[in-house]
Image (cartoon, helix red, strand yellow):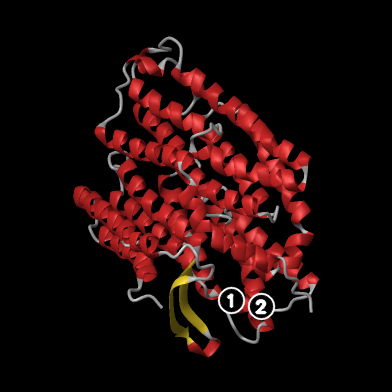
Amino acid sequence: MSAMPLLTLAIWVPILAGALVLATGSDRNAALARTIALLGAIAGFVVTLPLAMSFDTTVAGMQFVESTPWITRYHVNYSLGIDGISLLLILLNSFTTILVVLAGWKVIENRVAQYLAAFLVMSGLMNGVFAATDALLFYVFFEATLIPMFIVIGVWGGPNRVYAAVKFFLYTLLGSLLMLVALLYLYRASGGSFSLADWRKLPLGLTPQILVFLAFLVAFAVKVPMWPVHTWLPDAHVLPIAPDASHALSGFMIALSLIAVVYIGLVALVQTDMKKLIAYSSISHMGFVTLGLFLFERLGVEGAVIQMISHGFISGAMFLCVGVMYDRMHSRQIADYGGVVNTMPIFASFLMLFAMANSGLPATSGFVGEFMVIMAATKVNFWIAFTAATTLIFGAAYTLWMYKRVIFGAVANPHVAELKDLEPREWIFLAVLAVAVLWMGVHPAPFNAVLEAPVADLLQHLSKSKLP
């Protein structure tokens, strides 16, 4: 039990900040809303720093544990705790929330308070997802993220935003109902416990394990397009609950991962919209995460988590770069650009770094996780490693082809000729992400140190059969 409820603060500080932002009301108080949102996002990140500074990398179990009875009749507890995997994702989530506020500082002009509040609340809820050690509490946080995300898509989305929001809600609701059925089954099978620690020790036959595994798989897979940095963290908790099913279905999961890596990479090659290209690129890169997890090798699992963290930096940076151009020209079509380097040289330099990282260039964060997964794959099967490695070729192809058409060459049209280079606000958030990408690429040792103990513990649990 930690002296201070650090995890509770990490969850509720951003949520309360979101409530304060929402209380500012209409757009007449937009400046106040932005100020409170930025201070709230910074405070939300600051309260997570003691987690990193006090974290014991030699301990495999949960740290900073908090537990308070919640619904005593059903043995539901407000139970929180983190391992090295959760720690990194909480830090990433809280850090990127600050960048989200800065990125939308001038871009969002309508319903400013509601927009910023939605992201702050979602940040707190995601920290809850990463920290919950009670299954029902996890489910509440996991489902609550639907609300702000639904609002963001439906209000500030594209031309088909209402349709997209309803579709997103229905798909995620279907997956969530399957997960709820699995949770209730495990609750009953464990004799009335929602503790994830108790479920790890619960003997289960192969068929129940497979059904539980598939229920969780559908619930998490539906959310892949929306939260590619966070999606597969819950799988790290599901794998020890159903270790035999995890091994039995590993071939299926590896096949899905390779399809994501190769096929989606080819789909990205034919995109004419920059945002869609980066979105497909995200799905392709996230195939490395599932591949690494289901290789059941230390290098693979550590590489999968590092890939998630790296992807948070790179994907966020690439989307922000597209946003910088869209704010100026109101177009995401590659054909509408050309010769941007002539009018925005500083921006072109940042985009070059992020494009190289997206292609897996050594000394950038994009190389580290993918290389670790490929090395782990060579221990299992050479052809799995060979197939996965093609993403480096495809990634370079679609990313650099986009960069060439958008950035290089003569100025394509008068609109490009009128472009202005980065504002100080844009320079700051791109520079911060650039430092993160380079730091993680050059010196990944601190990340590996945090992951070593929890990954070893995870693999130990996966090596033990739970068949009765």
Percent of width and height locating residue 346: 34, 24
Question: Marks 1 and 2: CB-CB under 8 Å?
Answer: yes
Percent of width and height locating residue 171: 60, 56
Q: Is residue 280 left or right of residue 466?
A: left
Q: Quadrant of residue 322?
A: top left
Of 384 and 37, nearer the camera is 384
What is the three-letter code of the residue carrying label 1? Ala
Can residue 331 be seen by looking at this rendering? no
* Secondary element type, mark 1: helix
Of 95 and 382, nearer the camera is 382
Q: In the image, what residue occupies the spot 53% across and 34% down? A: 358
Q: In the image, what residue occupies the spot 53% across and 49% down? A: 306
* Secondary element type, mark 2: loop
Percent of width and height locating residue 347: 36, 26
Percent of width and height locating residue 262: 69, 36
Q: Is residue 255 left or right of residue 351?
A: right
Q: Is residue 183 left or right of residue 205?
A: left
Spatial CA distance of label 1 from label 2 is: 7 Å
Please say if 450 is above or below 243: above
Q: In the image, what residue occupies the spot 27% across and 31% down? A: 423
Of 306 and 119, nearer the camera is 306
- Badge 1 is on which residue? 197
Q: Quarter holding the N terminus?
A: bottom left
Q: Which residue is the extreme one toward the top?
A: 410
Q: Residues within 10 Å of mark 2 (few under 14, many from 20)?
A: few
Q: Which mark is residue 201?
A: 2
Q: Is residue 333 left or right of residue 300?
A: left
